[in-house]
């Protein structure tokens, strides 16, 4: 009877939405704005509008930033971060680091179960690490925990993880998908279909998923922490930023993970909307395939760095909601290099092309079908044309674009990175030789050496020097053209409270409620 009642509630509220807000998030700006049409009724379903449909729901196989938004409701991590990006306990309630940084011993929360009733314990943690490290699995997480040499069960609720060598970013890696625990029982039963039938220990469990339509989650009644106040979560994809914002203001959505930048001022002036702003950890740019012409020629790649007006893109497309980028690290990061964003220099770009020995330079840039992406691409097309570079634009659905990236079926594509709490997470997988996300197929022995040393060095000041040197080399070699760092905006109805705005840009639903 209880399940029937829940289904009845879902059917009634499937087209209604809810909102989430943050009253006390460190470093966030809260603005309450005007708009009489916004619905603010109290309800038990929170409707989230995302910028894309999550390609899959398996954290160990995920390579898309948008997946992580849904993961926050489905899974717990061993550790998490707070508003200051300090690491805090979650499924691991405490830990100690010994053996000169090579042994981590975690004491785990007790009385935790997965959504399918499987107990969470040290054996489950061991299973998760072995799954991510399995070479046949092909998990993108493998590079994040590649330093792990042993995982030893020391008791029902104590796990020991030994590393091959000291690895400074290890705990930070566990605050994201590498630290998300999946049910061993569900994995064994579902196999590859686990991506469509996810089972975690999180505050919400999957009820239904219809691709490109919605993901329905329901509150997990046996959740180990305080029961979430909101009963249902509905997640809907809106790749068109205009449509996403319109649905928020009209009342069909309660919170959106990304805002159309041209709408920032209107949202600030809407009295029924709360708009939060925070510096993010992400970077955005153009990934170049260095294995194919014309980008197998470094001089051609370098020419792009000087032909592109980054400042114009941030002003025209983002209305001040982004800043020009020159590396993987935003200015808020302690690894940010002391480098100036290059001024547009068309003559220098032409000179580099001449030095390259390549005749007429032309290529196709693949983008996702979003208005902002189209606007960026059109601006790039015009800028490069001035430097005698012809660029065609091809729009590709997001999931397909990821597949083409993974298979190397591109010359250039417009993709970025959502950012990680430790700088290693923003750069190693993208630029270390043969790393999982190094789809530029870039390889440089010096970069590999610097990135390796930054991983084993526990001194932050020394690590910063290493990352700054890497940034200088990457700008020179240009396997990836950094364009901008976005600020993170979360817009929601003002009666949504309890949203914790953290620089990792995630929507954590567990603490949210309606006022």
Image (cartoon, grey):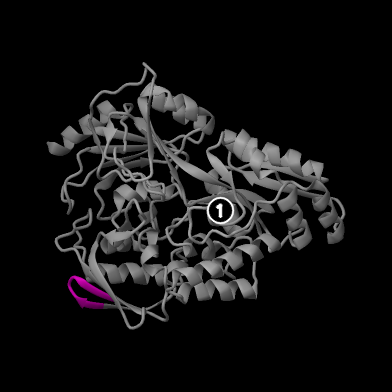
Horizontal side of residue 125 vs 398, given as left or right: left
For the C terminus, the quadrant is: top left
Left or right? Give the position of 396 relative to 99.
right
- Furthest-bottom residue in this view: 99
Magenta stretch secondary structure, dominant:
strand
Q: Position of residue 192 (x, y in %)?
A: 40, 59
The answer to whether 369 is drawn above or below residue 286 in the figure is above
Magenta-highlighted residues: 153-160
List x then y, in percent, for residue 147.
43, 76
Could you tell me which quadrant the N terminus lies in? top left
Give yes or no for residue 155 being in the magenta stretch: yes
Q: Residue at x 59, y 59 (%)?
A: 338
Name which quarter of the figure residue 444 lies in. Answer: bottom right
Residue at 29% x, 37% y is 23
Seen as rendered, the residue at the extreme left is 1
Residue 154, percent from left and from top: 21, 78
From this view, report whether residue 98 is shown above or below residue 440: below
Q: Secondary structure at mark 1?
A: helix
* Rendering quarter of residue 15: top left
Mark 1 — residue?
403
State left or right for residue 195 relative to residue 326.
Answer: left
- Placement of 481 over or under 34, stated as above or below: below
Using the rendered image of the protein, determine whether residue 397 is visible from the camera's viewpoint: yes
Q: Position of residue 368 (x, y in %)?
A: 58, 41
Q: Say whether residue 39 is magenta.
A: no
């Amino acid at each position: 009877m209880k399940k029937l009642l829940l289904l009845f509630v879902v059917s009634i509220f499937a087209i209604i939405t809810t909102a989430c807000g943050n009253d006390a998030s460190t470093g966030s700006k809260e603005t309450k704005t005007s708009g009489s049409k916004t619905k603010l009724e109290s309800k038990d379903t929170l409707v989230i509008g995302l910028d894309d449909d999550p390609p899959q729901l398996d954290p160990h196989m995920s390579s898309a930033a948008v997946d992580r938004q849904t993961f926050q409701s489905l899974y717990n991590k061993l550790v998490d971060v707070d508003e200051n990006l300090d690491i805090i306990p979650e499924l691991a309630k405490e830990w100690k680091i010994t053996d000169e940084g090579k042994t981590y011993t975690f004491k785990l929360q007790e009385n935790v179960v997965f959504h399918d009733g499987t107990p969470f314990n040290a054996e489950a943690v061991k299973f998760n690490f072995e799954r991510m490290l399995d070479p046949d699995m092909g998990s993108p997480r493998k590079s994040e925990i590649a330093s792990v040499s042993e995982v030893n069960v020391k008791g029902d609720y104590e796990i020991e993880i030994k590393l091959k060598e000291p690895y400074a970013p290890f705990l930070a890696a566990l605050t994201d998908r590498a630290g998300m625990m999946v049910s061993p029982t569900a994995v064994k039963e579902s196999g590859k279909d686990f991506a469509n039938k996810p089972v975690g220990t999180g505050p919400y469990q999957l009820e239904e998923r219809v691709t490109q339509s919605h993901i329905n989650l329901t509150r997990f009644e046996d959740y180990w922490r305080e029961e979430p106040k909101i009963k249902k979560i509905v997640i809907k994809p809106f790749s068109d930023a205009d449509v996403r914002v319109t649905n928020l203001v009209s009342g069909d959505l309660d919170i959106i993970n990304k805002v159309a930048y041209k709408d920032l001022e209107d949202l600030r002036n809407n009295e029924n909307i709360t708009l939060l702003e925070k510096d993010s950890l992400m970077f955005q740019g153009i990934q170049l395939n260095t294995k194919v012409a014309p980008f197998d020629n470094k001089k051609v790649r370098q020419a792009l760095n000087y032909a592109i007006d980054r400042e114009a893109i941030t002003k025209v497309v983002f209305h001040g909601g982004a800043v020009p980028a020159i590396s993987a690290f935003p200015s808020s990061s302690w690894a940010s290099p002391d480098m100036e964003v290059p001024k547009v220099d068309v003559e220098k770009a032409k000179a580099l092309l001449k030095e390259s020995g390549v005749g007429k330079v032309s290529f196709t840039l693949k983008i996702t079908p979003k208005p902002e992406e189209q606007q960026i691409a059109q601006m790039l097309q015009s800028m490069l044309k001035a430097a005698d570079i012809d660029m065609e634009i091809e729009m590709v659905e997001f999931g397909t674009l990821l597949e083409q990236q993974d298979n190397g079926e591109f010359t250039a594509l417009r993709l970025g990175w959502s950012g990680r709490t430790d700088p290693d997470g923003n750069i190693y997988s993208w630029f270390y030789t043969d790393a999982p996300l190094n789809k530029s197929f870039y390889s440089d022995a010096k970069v590999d050496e610097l990135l390796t040393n930054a991983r084993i060095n526990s001194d932050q000041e020394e690590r910063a020097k290493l990352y700054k040197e890497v940034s200088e080399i990457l700008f020179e070699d240009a396997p990836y053209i950094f364009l901008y760092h976005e600020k993170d905006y979360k817009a929601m109805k003002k009666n949504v409270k309890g949203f914790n705005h953290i620089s990792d840009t995630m929507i954590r639903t567990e603490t949210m409620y309606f006022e």
